[in-house]
Amino acid sequence: MEKGRGDIDKFIEYTLLQIDGLESLMSLVIKKVNQDELDDAKYILQVLTKKYPSNFQIFNILGVVLKRKKEYQEALKAFTRAAEISPKFTPAVMNIGNLFITIGKLERAIDSFNAAIEIDPNIVSAYNLKGKVLSKMMMFADAEVCFNKAIEIDDKNLDVKYNLAALYYNTRRYSEAFKLIEYLSEIVPDNITYLLFKARVLENIGRVNEAIEVIKSILMQNPNNIESIISLANIYANKLKDNMSAKNLYLEYYSKNPDSVVLMQKLCFFLMNIIHKKGCVDELDLAVSIGRRLLKFTKEKHFYSSILQLLFLESLCHDEYEKLGDQKDLMLDAIEDGTLTSLIFSMSRVKSIEDRIQVIECHKYLGKRLEEKALKRPIKKKIRQRLSNKKRIGMFSSYLSNTPVGYFAWPVIEKIDRTKFEVYCYSASPYTDEVRIEMENTADKFTSYGMYDHEYEVAQLMYEDQLDIVFEMGGITANHRMGAFAYKIAPIQVSWLGYPQSVGLPTSIDYILTDKYILPQDQRLIIEKPLVMPESWVVIDKVGFDKVNIVNDIPEDRCGVLTFGTLNAPYKYTQEAIAAWAEIMKMVPNSRFLCVRQHSRYKVFKDNFIMHMGKYGITQDRIVFIATDVNHLECYNYIDIALDTFPHTGGTTTCETLWMGVPLVTLVGQCFFERISYSNLSNVELSDLCASSVEEYKKIAVGLAYDKERRRALRRTLRDVILRSPLGQPERFVRNFEAKILEVI
């Protein structure tokens, strides 16, 4: 109906003069909706609502059209008007409930379904949808009641039984889930949804080969079913630890479905997860080529932007990264789709004070959402009763193992005064190693949660441990459970270690552990109250800091050229930092730059780094790459001066650099994540290597390059200096840590 609105009005008037004119127009509206011509459908219905203001059917269909157009407030008005005109008209009431689900107002959705049930106590769809909403809210017992009531009314309703099977699965009642999905698969043997669910249950009860056969049977009949391909690849990678079979499967079907956004996104995610695995040779290069194709699908950008942020930053594809859009939009997309770990990438891209405040505000927005969610379903609290007078400390992180968090958490776990304190540890990671085992044996209690345990369940169980204070040590990194802290599981909650700035829970995280160096001077750049350690905020101990031999001679004396370098993560590399590194090298003739990362095995990473340095006048022959999987500390023996990334500085990497006798130059910024190296250097009496501007950063680095005697002395003595400093004395640190705890509990 490509006409002016005047022509449409005339057409409507003419049609209404005919016998069954209204019926004809309503049929036309349905046709328009089916053809996705929603603007025309909306206009016709709006005209009809004026001519028939008491026709509830017109208002109801208008609501459907407006909802399709994502005009949610107007849709709600239309549905509400339909229900007002005809209070017993359950479709309008059900549509209101569905709309509330769409906009995330789940409690109001339940109210609507309850209203529909009050009108018609035998309305199966209301019980079913109410059960689905309750399941989404993790209120499984109430949801089960709804599903069973729906089945009582209509024992033949397969959708309800499928939702009940899903509930059994989500509550780990796998035998009940399997029994029900077996029944459904027999009733409708070709239903792909049922078969995939059956495979998932089989996988979780250890019958992996049977799960594979079920999925292969789907692909025999439906060779391009993307969901089946992804499920099979996940089994190969996660259950059988066969990454190459998973990769080959993905590539086989990608060649047949080259424009599938879902498949490209999943393939990129898979490849990024294995780029550091042994035997991988082209995974990052392949992921970049697919990621560049994904950029063409701009309508679905929010769907894949998080994985592309990681991909393009880790591969140094900065031009492609800029095409993803505005930083604020990327952060809000991450919050909306739940890919929260990508928020950390925003830290390395800040340039102005407004950018920095924006990062804080987006984290605060996330935190408020989590706190509002927790308020809607509080955990069950009771009077605290404990026989012991010891203060009970909780430490939560999915990285309590041989990881940076584990390095710095270990001294507290091992050396806390157990006449005064108990340490309870919590992790949501299934992975274990020697450090994790030692932590489990040393902590007063060590609880491991499943990777899929819900935050509500975690919060309830942690609360029941009656902690006096709990340290959240993961932020929104992988396998986090930050939402659990929104339930206020301990009287005092503190952020520390795992996330380099405020995590964003404005009322439930009380403090952030810091020191006087890291603490931002601008109060707008921190959300929690600062809990300021008297010296360092971390300490080096035996875990993670092996006594790898330091070669006493500086590399310049051994090789005849001075070597700058970095071991920092590539997502922290910025054009400004790379430009500064290049300028420094130009002022130190014949110097070279050593880049040590596992990424260095990939062509795209090396080509991009060479290209970026080349823009600022550094030729390829002055750049050296080392790709190492193990013993990376030994690589510091080839670096004369480490150049820090900025604005997002090193943390653990800076400690490692100093531990190996290598001086590091850093640029001190305004935010927490811009000041971590500043703290490490200041605590070993090297604050003169901390710059307040890019020009000073370059000046310090060049000055150090021409001061061989100082570098020789640091190489010989810096480890001993650390061991005498606040950064290297675990007992001293832990006593300060204990004192800070007693200040606030």
Image: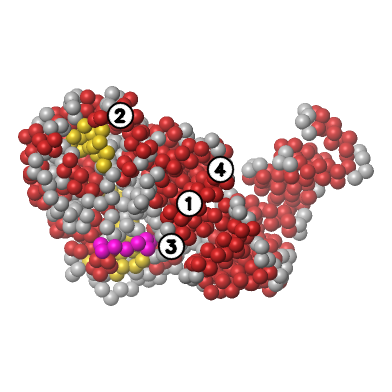
Q: For label 2, count other residues whose C-alpha is less than 10 Å away and answer few (under 14), some (14-19) or many (20+).
A: many
Q: For label 4, count other residues whose C-alpha is less than 10 Å away and answer few (under 14), some (14-19) or many (20+).
A: few
Q: Which is more N-terminal, label 4 or label 2?
A: 4
At mark 1, the secondary structure is helix
Q: Residue 468, image x and y in percent?
A: 30, 64
Residue for badge 3: 240
Residue for badge 1: 248
Camera-side mark, 3 or 1: 1
Q: Please identify the quadrant where the C terminus is shown.
A: bottom left
- Residue 434: name its quadrant: bottom left
Q: Residue 41, image x and y in percent?
A: 75, 40
Q: CA distance from mark 4 to mark 1?
A: 15 Å
Between 240 and 29, the residue placed more toward the observer is 240
Q: Residue at x 32, y 63 (%)?
A: 432
Q: Which is more N-terminal, label 1 or label 4?
A: 1
At mark 2, the secondary structure is helix
Q: CA distance from mark 2 to mark 1?
A: 35 Å
Residue for badge 2: 613
Confirm or deny contact between disc 2 and disc 4 (CB under 8 A).
no
Q: Which is more N-terminal, label 4 or label 3?
A: 3
Above or below, 511 against 686 in this view is: below
Residue 258 tag number: 4
